[in-house]
Amino acid sequence: MKLHEYLSKRVFAQYGVPIPDGDVATTPEEARAIAERLGGAVVVKSQVLVGGRGKAGGIKLAQNSAEAEQLAAQILAMEIKGLPVRKVLIDQAADIRQEIYLGIVVDRVASRPVMMASSEGGVEIEEVARLNPQAIKKVHIDPFVGLRGYQTRWLAKGIGLDPALQREFDRVARGLYQAFMGSDASLAEINPLVVTGEGKLLAVDGKMVLDDNGLFRHPDLAEKRDVDEETETEREAREAGLSYVQLDGEIGCMVNGAGLAMATMDITKHFGGAPANFLDIGGGAKAERVATALRLILADPNVKAVLFNIFGGITRCDEVAKGIIAALEQIKPNVPMVVRLVGTNEEEGRQVLADSAYRMIAATSLAEAAQKAVAAARGELEA
């Protein structure tokens, strides 16, 4: 789950990271009132969960409250990369003398968080990594020990930070790490972390991505989810407890287990097809959840065939089969379906399908199932 900039910075502030004074507005009038309270120049920033807001005209500097109201009206009427702007953040303008990047992500290879810093802040860190990788300094953090002072000093020295700011940089870095761990985040970044004309550090932008598996510990943040970033199908899937991502292919995939789902997508691509989605129904999925998943897949008009790849461990194949039949009775699809059921109660599951009024294409191996699904999507194979 992604957090908007204003929410991310509020989380940072709870852990001692300095942020500009400001507030969020949903109308031009609210923007004017906030700007009047702040006084002086303010920055009007669109709150949408995409990059490139500045290039799209979604970030503007206003010299006074009247201009802030005018710019807010313009920005609130925008769509940026297909997402409507529903809120703007009104922040006190900062006297920026230097821009730094500071962020933390989970390094899955090292199995621990990695903190990154760069003297080239204010631009996408991916571009810095591509064009000037030596400008990025990294330290891995042992979660049982935490971020240490010698690590933050090494980062500060590595990016050429003024020695007079190293102690403050240490406080900001530790605060960011605490926000990352305390929120069950998979990413937390300040870009840019600026050095102001007063010689202070200030987080003028922020971004957080939270691990959905930890959201039950953060109901206050979970309720802030921006549904605009999800398709209607993805929203329904999340509410049903399904892991679903819509893609651009023509073969709908229903699989139990994220790793098996990725393998299914890969082998489908290998045989010349294109998956229409990632969908993991999870372990122990019952017929009702399977039916919901199939409805979501078939709601995509691009789907020309459906591939079921079920390995019955916790999930019982006969329950999956019942879910398939229940969904078919509701939807009456007109696309071919390839089914591979292996594992717990696989014979019972196959019998459920065989006894139904629906004809499906059976497969025993994943490779066979993928090849048949690709052929079916091309109209070369019928049930």
Image (cartoon, grey):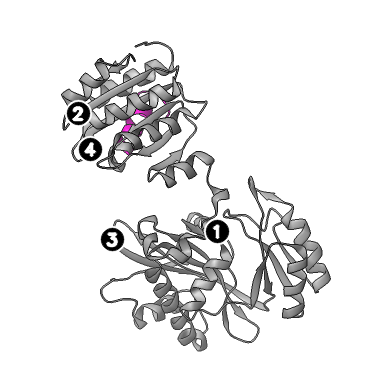
- Under circle 1, the secondary element is loop
Please tell me which residue lies in front, 211 or 285.
285
The residue that mark 4 highlights is 315
Nearest to N terminus: mark 3 or mark 1 = 3
Seen in the image, is 271 located left or right of residue 72? left
**Number of the label disc, if any, that sits on residue 124:** 1
**Label 1 to label 4: alpha-carbon separation:** 42 Å
**Label 3 to label 1: alpha-carbon separation:** 23 Å
Looking at the rendered structure, the kind of residue marked 4 is Thr
Q: Is residue 223 magenta?
A: no
Looking at the rendered structure, the kind of residue marked 1 is Glu
Nearest to N terminus: mark 1 or mark 4 = 1
The residue lying at 33 percent from left, 18 percent from top is 372
Looking at the rendered structure, the kind of residue marked 3 is Ala
Residue 126 vs 365, above or below: the answer is: below
Front position among marks 3 and 4: 4
Nearest to N terminus: mark 3 or mark 2 = 3
Nearest to N terminus: mark 3 or mark 4 = 3
* Circle 2 residues within 10 Å: few <14, some 14–19, many ≥20: many
**Number of the label disc, if any, that sits on residue 208:** none
- Under circle 2, the secondary element is strand
**Number of the label disc, if any, that sits on residue 342:** 2
Front position among marks 2 and 4: 4
- Report whether residue 364 is seen: no
The residue lying at 43 percent from left, 47 percent from top is 239
